[in-house]
Image: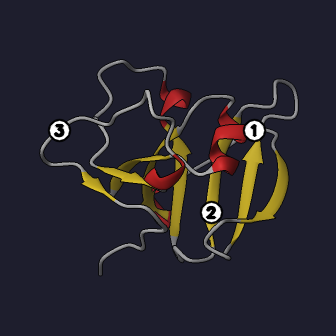
Amino acid sequence: MRVSVCHCLECQKRSGSAFATQARWPDEQVTISGDSAVWERVADSGHRVTYRFCPVCGSTLAYVIEGWPGVTAIPVGAFADPDFPKPRFSVYENRKHAWTEVLGEEVEHSSGFSVPQT
């Protein structure tokens, strides 16, 4: 559905980086197998986010946001694929580190929460 970069402070903390990059798919196209633990928080948007993470290493495996019903996000780093499609959305840029930039004329830039277009 979408590959995006999020600069919100919570994504920075969760990823241990200046931003987080994730890809989103309809729930029915996602299968997560194996053990995982769950953690929830309220996002900057005010929506509840439920994360599934590896109980051994702590890596985020997937997450869902109540503001994106029927959609699962998976961190792009989980694919370990340098050829993964590039992000086309960059959100919470008002919290972006000054030294980062998401390049490309086709990238949609936003200072806040971006909801899916139906």
- Circle 1 Cα neighbour tier, 10 Å, few/some/many (<14 / 14–19 / ≥20): few
Q: Nearer the viewer, residue 95 or 24?
A: 95
Q: Residue at x 12, y 44 (%)?
A: 105
How crowded pointer 3 is (Cα within 10 Å; few <14, some 14-19, many 20+) is rated as few
Question: Can you tell which mark lies on residue 104?
Answer: 3
Q: Residue 12, how many percent across, how many down? A: 64, 39
Reading the image, the residue beneath label 2 is: 64
Query: Separation of disc 3 and disc 1 at Cα?
Result: 37 Å
Of labels 2 and 1, the one closer to you: 2
Relative placement, left or right, of 73 versus 88 is right
Question: Comparing marks 3 and 1, which lies closer to the viewer?
Answer: 3
Task: Label 2, secondary structure: give it.
Answer: strand
**Which is more N-terminal, label 1 or label 3?**
1
Residue at screen point 24% across, 35% down: 103
Q: Is residue 23 visible?
A: yes
- Disc 2 marks a residue whose amino acid type is Val
Residue under label 1? 34
Residue that protrudes farthest toward the bottom in the picture:
118
Q: Earlier in the sequence, mark 2 or mark 3?
A: 2
Name the image quarter holding the N terminus: bottom left
Q: Nearer the viewer, residue 84 or 18?
A: 18
Tell me the amino acid under the disc marked 1. Gly
In this view, 57 is above or below 105? above
Figure check: 106 above or below 45:
above
